[in-house]
Every structure is written in structure tokens, then in C-alpha cells.
Image (tube, helix red, strand yellow):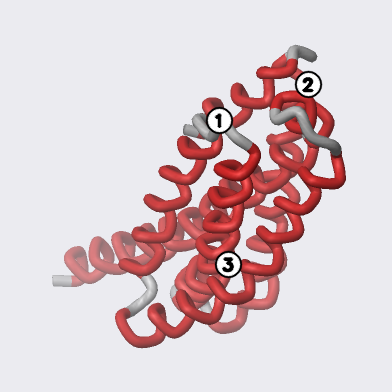
Amino acid sequence: MPQKQLQSTSNTDLSKWCFFLCGFLAWTADAFDFHALSIQTTKLAKYYNTNNTNISTAITLTLLLRSVGAAGFGLAGDRFGRKWPMVLNMVVLGLLQIATIYSSTFQQFLAVRSLFGLFMGGVYGNAIAMALEHCPVDARGLMSGILQQGYSFGYVLAACANLGVGGSVESWKVNYFTQL
């Protein structure tokens, strides 16, 4: 009997770490996509035959709509549990990454990045809440600090990917393929 309790506790501890890892990786992936765009502003401007200011508009729309997505997916997470809104969120973000690559006009690009902002907003709240709900109460402060670093880690990955893709105008698309 005690052996079954130890095994059950071990599985429970493993699942808690899986929730934490999922939260960290979701936040990292979100940051990678966002920063991969902002790092490549000049390449995107050349690709869409526009200026850096217009590309920055896409970044601004992404950030503005992030608040709307955070509220909507936060309410969904509270009502239906964190798991399924998070799964939906990550699937749609993956599809929006693909749509970003295949946006052939600046207007399409702007629309896709606006939608991305809605779903980007839904990641942090549910990912972090889900991860921290499964952490020991006395470690939540430390673990929330570590989770927050997922965003910085995503930026570092995006910067490294940018260094590896070269300088051609269409090389920005490679950053999105590296994450898929």
C-alpha cells in the first residue's frame, strides 16, 4: 500500500512540472513570434513595399488587441477551465503564424497580426495561472518569476533565429518556420 502512495505522489509531482513547463513554453513561443516580427521590421517593410512606420502599426495593433484577448480568454479560462482555452489559443496562434508567412499583401499581413494580438493576449493569463495553480503555495513567487522569464527566453530565441537566417528580403519567413 505505501508503495502505491509513493507512485501516486510521484505522478502528481510530474504532472505539476508538466503544467509548469507547458506554461513556460507557451509564453516562450508567444514571445518568439512577437519578437521575430519586431526584429525584422526593415525586411518586412521591403517585402511589403512599405515603410517601417507601417510595419510598426502592425506591432501596435498586436499590442492593443492583446488586452481584448486577455480579457476574453481569461473569462473563458475561469468559466471552462484553463486547459481547453489554452489549447485553442495555441492552435490558433500556430495557424496565424502560417497565415503570417503566406500574407501576400500588407493589408492581409495587418489583419493577421491584429488577430494574432487577440490570441496572444489569451496566452499569458491562462498559461501562467495553470502553471502556478499546480505549484506548491510557498514556491509560487519564485516560480512566477521563472515563468516570466519565458518571455525573455522567447526574445533570445527570436534574436538567434534572426542571426541565422541571413539578409535576404524573404528571410523573415524562416523565423516563423523555425517555430512551427
Asked whether the beta carbons under mark 1 and mark 3 sit within 8 Å of each other, the answer is no
Q: Residue at x 54, y 38 (%)?
A: 100
Q: Residue at x 50, y 54 (%)?
A: 21
Quarter of the rendering containing residue 154:
top right
Q: Is residue 131 left or right of residue 31?
A: left
* Image mark for residue 163: 2
Tell me where residue 113 appears, x and y as whole percent.
60, 50
In this picture, is 30 found above or below 123? above
In this picture, is 25 found above or below 48? below
Residue 135 seen in the figure? no
The mark that comes first in sequence, 2 or 1, is: 1
Kindly report which numbered mark, 1 or 3, lies closer to the viewer in this rendering: 1
Question: From mark 3 to mark 2, how far is it between C-alphas?
Answer: 27 Å
* Image mark for residue 66: none
Question: SS for tag 1?
Answer: loop
Name the amino acid, label 2: Leu
* Image mark for residue 104: 1
Quarter of the rendering containing residue 27:
bottom right
Kindly report which numbered mark, 3 or 2, lies closer to the viewer in this rendering: 3
